[in-house]
Image (cartoon, rainbow, N blue to C red):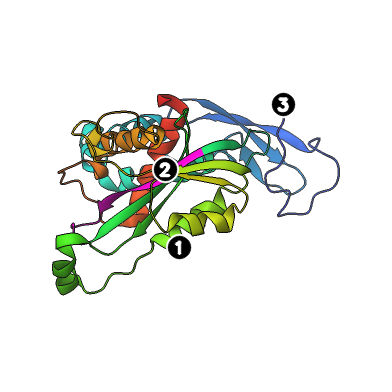
Amino acid sequence: MRPECPYRHIHPHTASGNRKIVRLGSYRRKSDGRRVKRFRCNECGKGFSHATRSACYKQNKRHLNDRFRKLFASGISQRRLARLFSVSRTTVVRKHLFLASQSRGKVQRTETTEPVFEIVEFDDLETFEHTKFKPLSVFLAVEYKTRRVIDLEVARMPAKGKLSARALKKYGPREDERPAARRRLFERIQSRVSSVAIFKSDMNPHYPLDLKRAFPHAEHRRFKGRRGCIVGQGELKRGGFDPLFSFNHTAAMFRANVNRLFRRTWNTTKRPDRLADHLMIYAHYHNSTLI
């Protein structure tokens, strides 16, 4: 079957469909050895192949994409991947950005045919960039029971507790981006969550107002926070029934499978946007494979 000319929206074409598309041989792709058919459009004179519209177009190491996606979601660092596969760190970074872009589109789905979420648990987990004086908040929304990751946002926040005075002295004031991140996430999931959904969270005083702006008719159930247990990366709660188990279990899996979130690790994040990219890769793997 002859495909459509991918340049028909750029160059003038008549309404003759694909009858002007002719075969132009084939070539063996170096990256995976697959034979790809070539074509030519007689109307615009452009040549193309079955691979022209592929998301992996012009990638020399496309055979590593699926392996890297699994390993990024399995606690492996970028430097270790470069060493294991004998590739440069630049290649690993490019793969990281490509996989993050692909994963973001699949996690933040826009298809209206899929059912909307009815019960959502949300909260945040904390990590840091470069040093504990620069904490980050990962705001996460998870579907109840299935533990499917709906969406996430990464935001800077000021240091708190005993570190706040030292952080202020060393790095100066730090903007709190958490309110804006929460609003962005709630606005983004409006099309995928029922307008009368049930939202579950802890007793954070800032949550009700942000939620009310995006979901005025939703029900918000709040539960008192509890101390974490040693297992589950400190995210699972100690003893008894946990009303936010779906969120806490998912947060524990994030910490166990994303090396930037490990407890007591030297794999620290240098850029919040790259942390968000890494979390999106894991979120897609979590939704499509682990659960």
Residue 181 in view in this figure: yes
* Marks 1 and 3, the one that precedes in the sequence: 3
User: For the stretch drawn in magenta, what is the main secondary structure?
Assistant: strand
Quadrant assignment for the N terminus:
top right
Q: Position of residue 111 (x, y in %)?
A: 64, 39
Viewer-nearest residue: 84 or 164? 164
Where is mark 1, residue-wise? 180
Real-space CA distance between mark 1 and mark 2, rounded to the nearest whole angstrom: 19 Å
Q: At 45% across and 55% down in the image, what residue appears?
A: 207
Q: Residues within 10 Å of mark 2 (few under 14, many from 20)?
A: many
Decide which of 77, 89 is in the foreground and name it.
Answer: 77
Q: Amino acid at mark 2?
A: Met
Residue 49, located in which quarter of the rendered image? top right
Is 129 covered by the magenta stretch?
yes
Identify the secondary structure beneath mark 3.
loop
Q: Amino acid at mark 3?
A: Met
Q: In the drawing, does residue 101 fall left or right of residue 279?
A: right
Q: Which mark is residue 131?
A: none
Residue 164 lies in the magenta-colored region = no
Callout 3 environment at 10 Å: few (<14), some (14 to 19), or many (20+)? few
Q: Is residue 9 left or right of residue 34?
A: right
Rounded to the nearest angstrom, the CA distance separating label 2 from label 3 is 36 Å
Q: On the image, numbered disc 3 is attached to which residue?
A: 1
**Label 1 neighbourhood size at 10 Å, few (<14), some (14-19), many (20+)?**
few
* Pair 2/3: label in front: 2
CA distance separating discs 1 and 3 = 49 Å
* SS label for mark 1: helix
Residue annotated with mark 2: 280
